[in-house]
Image (cartoon, rainbow, N blue to C red):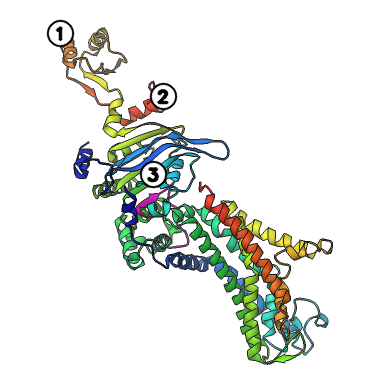
Amino acid sequence: MSRADLTAAPERSALWTFGLLGSELTTVLRRGRTLALLGVLAAVPVLIGIAVRIETGDGSPAGPGGGGGPAFLSQVSHNGLFLVFAALSATLPVFLPMTVGVVAGDSVAGEANAGTLRYLLVAPAGRSRLLLTKYTSVLVFCLVATLVVAVSGLVAGALLFPVGEVTTISGTRIGFGEGLLRAGLIALVVAVSLSGFAALGLFVSTLTDSGIAAMAATVGVLITAQIVDGIPQLDAVGPYLFPHLWMSFTDLLRAPVYWDEIVRNLGVQAVYVAVFGSAAWARFTTKDITV
Amino acid sequence: MDRTADRAADTGPDTDTGSGMGSGTVIETRDLTKRYRGGQLAVDGLDLRVPGGSVFGFLGPNGSGKTTTIRMLMGLVEPTSGTARVLGSPVPAAVRTVLPHVGALIEGPAPYGFLTGRDNLLRLDRADPTADPRTRRARVEGALERVGLAAAAGKKAKAYSLGMKQRLGLAGALLRPRRLLVLDEPTNGLDPQGMREIRALVRELASEGTTVFLSSHLLDEIEQVCDHAAVMARGRLLVQGPVAALAARARGRLVVTTPDPDTAARVLREHGTGGLAVDGERVGADAPPPDTELADLNTALVRAGVRVRSFGVERGTLEDAFVALTGEGFDVAG
């Protein structure tokens, strides 16, 4: 068979990547497991809202002296929009990234485990194309998961509490419309904050043929990083850890917005994406697929 | 092997220029070797040649390196050394251009349990960047129809029996017209009726000009559907060639049926045949060397007063050849 014979094959479409990406997204998002994770994420703001509502039903301020618990909790009873920020603050340290760890860790290893990876590669999906598609779909999941928390917080907040002008951390007041805009921006920043961890999860996923092992290892890395980040004696390594500046999104609620830490956070995530994305690519494109 | 002859006639002179379907060499490996990281030598210096248009049986016991070979041909495993060409192009370098022409069933089916049969095929087809999205639905339905899975296409694959999953895997290999089908144990898990259907399908595909590379441990399967075969053991290729020629390598048995078996056995022994075995009225012996005139042997029997009811050489089966090649017997050095 000559080469000319082969290249006479149907041309690949200019949109060749998107066929697989669409399939990947519907496959990931339609899975019962993904829906269960998103359902639990949606329930968190509702539960926080109900708890605050019950506690403040007698007119007392929320929280013990308004200090403990996730940030913004004390403002929730005055303005339902703050339930979005409170819910994101509550889920961002562990719960939200944990769901990302499950999806990212399972992305390649789960397919290997099920044997479907060999059929995708023989299709032929192309290794770089498949990996890129996988990472894109994990990023989309990061955004969807964050939006689920935010939207659920917004709906529950609007139903349980009054909404209106927003008092920023700096003490100034901004209109509700502007507040909504900031909430949307915050959701976006939170989702992008998860991109570094998502790349790490993808890399772990290329190392093993067991989806469960990859998920557990990825979530384990997350918890370890959070613990190390919380130990004062290990302050020196803190700034290099991916979760270190995650909470910087609250700076978007200042007037004017304080960008320094947000930008540094995004820089850290970019480094993680570059390092672990390259590692995942190097590993996956040379790996022997024996399952 | 009528089919071999037909096919040879169809494809005309084997010019190796590869201009048309089913001619030339479809799979060719040179000294293909795979040593896994653990040091285990899975495939050792394989020189395989699969002629275009053939139904090629790839035989060998478990662990003989068949699956590793198939994985190297499909670009899933990188050879340690040696080269492989599929449809004329080197693999794994050119897998992106080669594999759209290849349908494969590798080491059993692996559908997404949470997707329906139809959605499984849609996903596979979308993974192939050269597949035309406009004809996707129709091609998926056609493939489901072809393997007899149309009625169950809307069911989730986790509810499928192994046989149905096997059919779904085959449907995945048939999503587009292919020039080469690589089928690893395609009848595993199927009932006898299902096996017949799959074999009929393989013959049908072959008659359309698709080269079929079929690995199996079932000798009669290879003998029923294949015209060429290769035998592997312990990572090495023992022999390859037309099935008829391979079967002929097995030494046939001379069989005489007679009411006088004892006399017959004595006469045969006097004429130097070995491997005598008397079973009731049936006397078996190793077939005499090719230069022996069998009629003379028969005459000798009759002259000795043996009443010969039947006399003849039973052709060796592929199984005899296989047993001889894979270690039980004598001339392993194929």
Q: Chain of mark 2?
A: B
* Dot 3 and dot 1 residues touching (CB under 8 Å): no
**Boundaries of the magenta span:** B99-117
Chain of the residue on which disc 3 is drawn: B
Q: Identify the residue under disc 3.
A: B85
Quarter residue A52 falls in: bottom right
Give the structural element (helix, strand or loop) at label 3.
Answer: strand
Q: Along the polypeptide, which appears first: circle 2 or circle 3?
A: 3
Q: CB atoms at circles 2 and 3 under 8 Å apart?
A: no
Picture residue at 23% right of the left edge, 39% below the top: B4
Task: Judge whether B159 appears above or below B182 on screen.
Answer: below
Question: Would you place residue A242 above or below residue B240 in this image?
Answer: below
Residue B38 falls left or right of residue B175: right
Residue type at mark 3: give it. Arg
- Which disc is residue B328 wearing? 2
Q: Is residue A101 visible?
A: no
> Dot 1: what SS?
helix
Structural distance between the alpha carbons of marks 2 and 3:
33 Å
Q: Quadrant of the C terminus of chain B?
A: top left
**Rendering coords of residue A284 (x, y %):** 54, 53
In the rendered image, residue B46 lying in the magenta stretch gets the answer no
